[in-house]
Image (cartoon, rainbow, N blue to C red):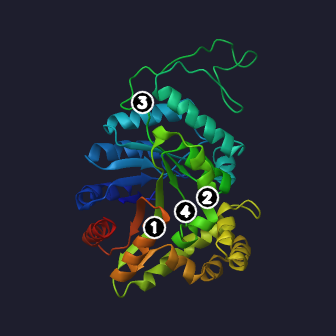
Amino acid sequence: MRIGMALNYSGGFKESVAELADYEKAGLDIVFVAEAYSFDAVSQMGYIAAKTERLEIASGILPIYSRTPALLAMTAAGLDYVSDGRFTLGLGASGPQVIEGFHGVPYTAPLGRTREIIEICRQVWRRERLEYEGKHYTLPLPPGQGTGLGKPLKIINHPVRPRVPIVIAAIGPKNVELAAELAEGWEPIFYVPEKAADVWGPSLAAGRAKRQDGLGELDVIAQASLAIGDDVAGLLEFGRPMAALYIGGMGAKGRNFYNDLARRYGYEKEAEAIQELYLDGKKEEAAALVPHELLESMSLIGSDGFVRDRVAAMKESGVTTLNIAPFGATHEDRVKLIERIKEIAS
């Protein structure tokens, strides 16, 4: 089982990267860099590539709407080059609030666009002349659009690898099926191993039934906060605001994927109440309603025995990469946590 970690996109980036060398020595395998309405992730991942030697680097995620498919392919190939083949392209749809509000792009057809983007990216990496006719992307532009001067081109440089690994962040049934069919990896959020088979099992099975042999086994990347000790249970409370933000505030009623997930986990009443309060501006009250059981079941916060049991449950459910958020008062504490979870997960 690989050990990964996500970097905070809201501040302190250079300070976090300065610590990565020690995390790398402690056993960290891969680092994920998010891109919200923040600094772009690409420049930051290039910076990480220059500051590390072994550590794999992944976008977690680049939204599919904010770059053309060819630019996503070029960017991935460039990052794979400067990192000597250590890059993974994490893709996701984000949400309409960010895509339409910050980027001014219609949030349409996330499934169809994701499929076509993956096909186009792999065509670029194989250095084929780029000709593609899809429902959402046509390359070159067809007659009647643009100047009519577009022509099929292939990427000038030779990519380090003819296929850069792709991870899809997905929680909806059809998106998860798509990830299992086309991508090297799948990254859900709010992962509860005991309920994963019920919630996502049919989608994963349907996608794997169409999966090409050359893709290998699906890398399942689960996120979890990490703290080990007999007196750390109180740290679960730090997860309440984020859980409430996603379940309650990441989307309007009827268009909140995370709220839907909480309902599918069996927390229908709680999810409805959290959303009502959050959208009314009562964020603290909403956070207070996040079930303790949910926070605990998707975390690695507790005694050594508890964490070992949770890691075993993750493995049994099919998780192959643990994407942790280590709680430590100091840099040294976080290094020790990475060393311990690496030992537990091995």
Which residue bears the numbered disc 1? 316
Residue topped by disc 4: 189
Residue 180 shows in this picture? yes
Q: Residues within 10 Å of mark 4 (few under 14, many from 20)?
A: some
Q: Position of residue 166 (x, y in %)?
A: 48, 43
Where is residue 184 drawn, in percent x and y?
A: 48, 45
Give SS at disc 2: loop
Mark before the other along the chain sequence, 1 or 2:
2
- Name the residue rendered at 41%, 78% in the picture: 301
Up/down of 22 relative to 310, above or below: above
Q: CA distance from mark 1 to mark 4?
A: 18 Å
Q: Nearer the viewer, residue 98 or 225?
A: 225
- Residue at mark 3: 162
Give the Cα distance between marks 3 and 4.
29 Å
Q: Earlier in the sequence, mark 2 or mark 4?
A: 2
- Under circle 1, the secondary element is helix
Q: Earlier in the sequence, mark 3 or mark 1?
A: 3
- Badge 3 amino acid: Pro
- Circle 2 packing at 10 Å, graded few (<14), some (14-19), many (20+), is many
The quadrant the C terminus occupies is bottom left
Q: Nearer the viewer, mark 3 or mark 1?
A: 1
Q: What residue is shown at x 39% (from left), y 60% (from top)?
A: 5
> Spatial distance from mark 3 to mark 1, Cα to Cα?
32 Å
Residue occupied by mark 2: 171
Identify residue type, mark 1. Answer: Glu
| Mark 2 and mark 3: Cα distance apart in space | 28 Å
